Amino acid sequence: MSFPREFKVDKSRIPSETWRCFMGRRVVASYCSSFLKSEMLHIYRQVKALRGVDTFVVTKEVQNTERFPFDDIEIIPKRRTNLLVHGWLKFVERRPPIVYRGEYQTLDSLLERHGADLMHIYFGHTGVHLLPFIEQWDKPCVVSFHGADVAHKQDIKDYPAKLRRLFDAVPLVFARSQSLVDRLIQLGCPPEKLRINRTGIPLNEFPFVDRQPPPDGKWRVVQACRLIPKKGIATSLRAFAIFKKDNPKAEFFVAGKGPLQPELEMLAGGLGILRDVHFVGFLSQRKLLELYASSHLFLHPSEISPNQDQEGVPNSVLEAMATGLPVVATRHGGIPEAVDHGRTGFLVAEEDHVGLANAMQLITRSPDLLRQMGARAHATVVERFEQDAQIDQLESFYEEAITMNGASEPVKSNLVAQLAPRFAEGLPAK
């Protein structure tokens, strides 16, 4: 059945489940406890880029709305509960937080109202929090792991055991890199449930820049990340201090914020490079792109934390590579899955600031190497991390999980013929 071009439907008059049946599209709830923290741009891009399914966001709190605008957000409110009931559930019956905080019924009702076929939960520790719901809901959930959620969680009792329960409760588990897949297998996830869901980069937002050595010797080095231990910024500062001995006009720009900033500023001062190290804070996307475009080298010497906190494939590494920046980094986590040693950059051992400085010197002493590595870096992102291709794969994983749960194909029945006249009249479907 075809409709005239000017045919319009007032979706607000139609129950969501009816609308889904009419259009024959899956509905996916994207659950993220906070939507969104400044460092979660990659999640925003993924949710916004979904096009083969309809999605809405479920969250407990909304942050940074100007940076991350989204039309369809459901906020789980903090419910006012009877203190006696709350205390009984928490301390006597030992029920989990999602129950004694009153989130369970709220989540169930809003998923039903939207006609959700599946819920995608961001981060493993959030999946652990939602375990009682996941195990009871009659639709499937999938959980994606990004790095920090495979670390030891001192604030979550029996976290490894609860992760194994989570793995049993969901049909599929997503990981951002092969390194995280390997870690999840160590934690007890069945290999057949694991799927790699890589970060997608919108290439139109990161145009390629053909870089030339600076004629005045003012090399610009950049690192963009949160200022936390696993990002290895202290190693970057020590390497830059060595690099600067032969390149006195060089400057180092650190884009990001975090608890280590005072300590890092003190280190830069002790190394005698504070004047040429610029902590520029979190930048807007436009400002960050300008910084990438004006720089010559990108550093990211990540290191594993004592609690096993590790990287997937750092989003900033892929953005920098997309613009043609050669990367000098470490053999850590998923970084070697993006950076080909000797082709798109160099990889050294974790905490090896001397090796990092030597790699920087190799690139800056060879104009051909600078250009060739930059061109290959861009090509790698196009081939392995282009956003549309990654979204297509993610949506195929959604369909796989729904099918594994025993759901039927989306309904495209004669509802179209039955309901179209009423929609055209602007009347609610009965």
Image: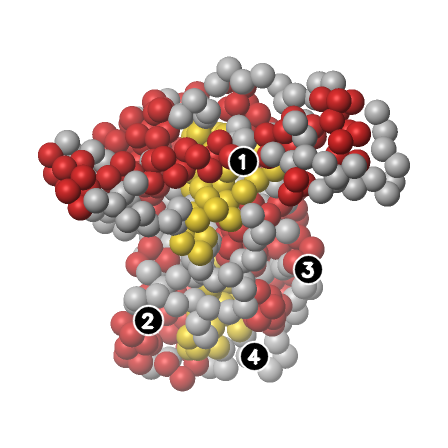
Distance between the Cα atoms at labels 2 and 3?
A: 30 Å
Residue type marked 3: Pro
Residue 229 on image: x %, y %: 30, 59
Q: Earlier in the sequence, mark 2 or mark 3?
A: 3
Density class for disc 2 (Cα within 10 Å; few <14, some 14-19, many ≥20) is some
Left of 428 or right of it: where is 61? Answer: left
Q: Earlier in the sequence, mark 3 or mark 4?
A: 3
Secondary structure of residue under mark 2: helix
Residue at left 42%, top 75%? 279
Q: Earlier in the sequence, mark 3 or mark 1?
A: 1
Quarter of the rendering containing residue 4: top right
Distance between the Cα atoms at labels 2 and 1?
A: 43 Å
Proximity of marks 2 and 1: CB atoms separated by less than 8 Å: no
Q: Where is mark 4, residue-wise?
A: 217
Find the residue positioned furthest to the right.
4
Q: Where is mark 3, residue-wise?
A: 207
Q: Is residue 305 above or below residue 216?
A: above
Q: Where is mark 2, residue-wise?
A: 261
Q: Nearer the viewer, mark 4 or mark 2?
A: 2
Q: Of residues 122 and 25, which is closer to you in this image?
A: 25
